[in-house]
Image (cartoon, rainbow, N blue to C red):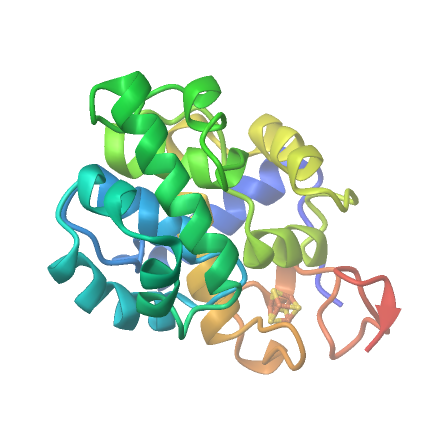
């Protein structure tokens, strides 16, 4: 078991520093070329891999050009164009309805506030945070996805389970200039080393800081269960 820093703030700072050195080019892996494409890619990425989304949006973004195209498509046609994505039927509805609202209420532009974005169908705080950060350069929260959730718990930054609660706690701990990057660093480390089922603690740059480290700790703090 590693030994966490004395305070959670210090722990968060040390984690950011180590992961930044390890993943200097860490950034969003969804592909898009404008705000609407970003919004759609993030809606589609819920419970689906970025890799799968990127594969599907390659032809989607070539076929549909702007909110009118999505709003004018039938539900069945759009669902068919998204058929390799998890929950493609519901997501086709979210994309269509969001585009309709964007045309009606926002003159065809993706809105730039948390409250307006979360009014769009299929858009929760996590999706809105990604769109604000990468589409509008507005960082007002921390995106908590499954990797951020798992790593934050494993590394002793939070004991909360709900993403909204975890986000609030992380905002107290992660240095202000790193809120956006923290998510990408956790995602990269979660994919490369600290995966859900079998983290490679023996090859982890955070091992000496991590209270879940498998060598000595009996418990995975992400689940609270024994390793
Ligand atoms: S890989 Fe192991 S040591 Fe590293 S952060 Fe994950 S649980 Fe901790």
Quick check: can you spot residue 71?
yes
> Where's the C terminus, which quadrant?
bottom right
Foreground residue, 180 or 10?
A: 180
Task: Say which quarter of the image contains residue 134.
Answer: top left
Q: Is residue 210 above or below residue 131?
A: below
Residue drawn at x 74%, y 60% as measured from the top left: 222
Foreground residue, 133 or 79?
A: 79
Q: Is residue 79 above or below residue 141?
A: below
Residue drawn at x 66%, y 32% as measured from the top left: 169
Residue drawn at x 19%, y 38% as measured from the top left: 68
Task: Classify the position of ligand 1 by quadrant: top left, top right, bottom left or bottom right.
Answer: bottom right
Q: Is residue 106 above or below residue 222?
A: above
Count the numbered circles shown: 0
Percent coordinates x, y for residue 196 in the rendering: 64, 72
Percent coordinates x, y for residue 29 in the rendering: 30, 60
Quick check: can you spot residue 179?
no
């Amino acid at each position: 078991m590693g030994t966490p820093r004395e305070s959670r703030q210090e722990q968060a700072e040390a984690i950011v520093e180590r992961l930044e050195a390890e993943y200097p080019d860490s950034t969003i892996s969804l592909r898009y070329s404008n705000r609407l494409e970003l919004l759609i890619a993030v809606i589609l990425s819920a419970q689906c891999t970025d890799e799968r989304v990127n594969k599907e949006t390659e032809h989607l973004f070539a076929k549909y050009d702007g909110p009118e195209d999505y709003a004018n498509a039938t539900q069945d046609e759009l669902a068919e164009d998204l058929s390799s994505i998890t929950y493609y039927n519901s997501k086709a509805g979210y994309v269509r309805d969001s585009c309709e609202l964007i045309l009606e209420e926002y003159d065809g532009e993706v809105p730039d506030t948390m409250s307006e974005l979360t009014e769009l169908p299929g858009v929760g705080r996590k999706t809105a945070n990604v769109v604000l950060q990468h589409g509008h350069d507005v960082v007002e929260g921390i995106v908590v996805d499954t990797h951020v959730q798992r790593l934050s718990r494993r590394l002793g930054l939070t004991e909360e389970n709900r993403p909204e609660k975890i986000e609030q706690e992380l905002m107290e701990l992660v240095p202000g200039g790193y809120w956006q990057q923290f998510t990408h660093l956790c995602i990269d480390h979660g994919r490369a080393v600290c995966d859900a089922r079998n983290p490679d603690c023996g090859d982890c740059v955070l091992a000496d800081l991590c209270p879940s480290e498998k060598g000595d700790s009996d418990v995975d703090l992400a689940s609270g269960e024994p390793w």
